[in-house]
Amino acid sequence: MTVGKTCEPTTLTQDEDEARKKITSILAKAQPVILLDNIRTGLDSSQLASALTAETWSDRILGQTRMIDLPNRATWIVTANNPHLSLEIARRCVRVRLDAKTDRPWARTGFKHSPLREWTKTNRVRLVRAVLVLVRAWLAAGRPPGKRTLGSFESWAAVVGGILEHAEIPGFLHDTEEL
């Protein structure tokens, strides 16, 4: 919902050559958010690891001998249940851990905002405004950088960490060693 519509989920194969082709196809769509959904066994892909840190992704166009260069400005999101991540993937990740405290989270009821997708569509303006207020407060404070960093994502960590620290929201990048 960050861009006003839901992102299109996709999966990623364990075959490295197919993963490379899939990444190229995904980046060719120039989506701002890429969702790799329902990773079942884990992630151990040198192609994905490379894509996560590449500002420009280069690959051969299928069926041709020429190369294509694609900008990679997307936010990559992966959903999984306790996945095993290779070290090269783990070091490029920020984990968001949700614990429903139940064995059957899909059967829960009584949510504060239900259905959530409709609520976010209805309240999108308020949600975006709230984020912009946090960013503006950080800017007015002189853009103090965050104290934690993430290799290959230093600028991002300084900005996001700075915004969260200024807003007194704890925990940013505190579990990177655990991941």
Image (tube, helix red, strand yellow):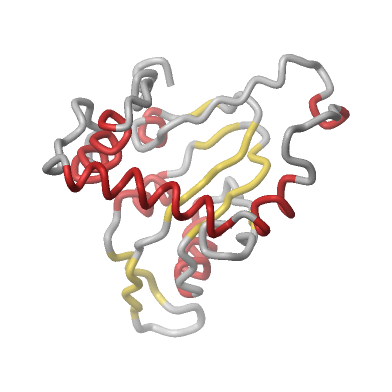
Q: Quadrant of the N terminus?
A: bottom right
Where, by quadrant of the figure, is residue 107 drawn? Answer: top right
Q: Is 107 left or right of 101, judged from the image as shown?
A: right
Q: How many marks?
A: 0
Q: Is 38 left or right of 74, judged from the image as shown?
A: right
* Residue 177 pos. (x, y %): 35, 17
**Residue at x 40% of width, y 35% of height:** 93
Where, by quadrant of the figure, is residue 178 drawn? Answer: top left
Where, by quadrant of the figure, is residue 38 drawn? Answer: top right
Comparing 46 with 132, the one in front is 132
Up-down relation of residue 76 to residue 55 (above or below): above
Q: Quadrant of the C terminus?
A: top left
* Residue 61 pos. (x, y %): 44, 79
* Residue 5 pos. (x, y %): 62, 65
* Residue 18 pos. (x, y %): 55, 59
**Residue at x 48% of width, y 37% of height:** 44
**Residue at x 83% of width, y 29% of height:** 110
**Residue at x 35% of width, y 72% of height:** 70
Up-down relation of residue 59 to residue 94 (above or below): below
Comparing 152 with 16, the one in front is 152
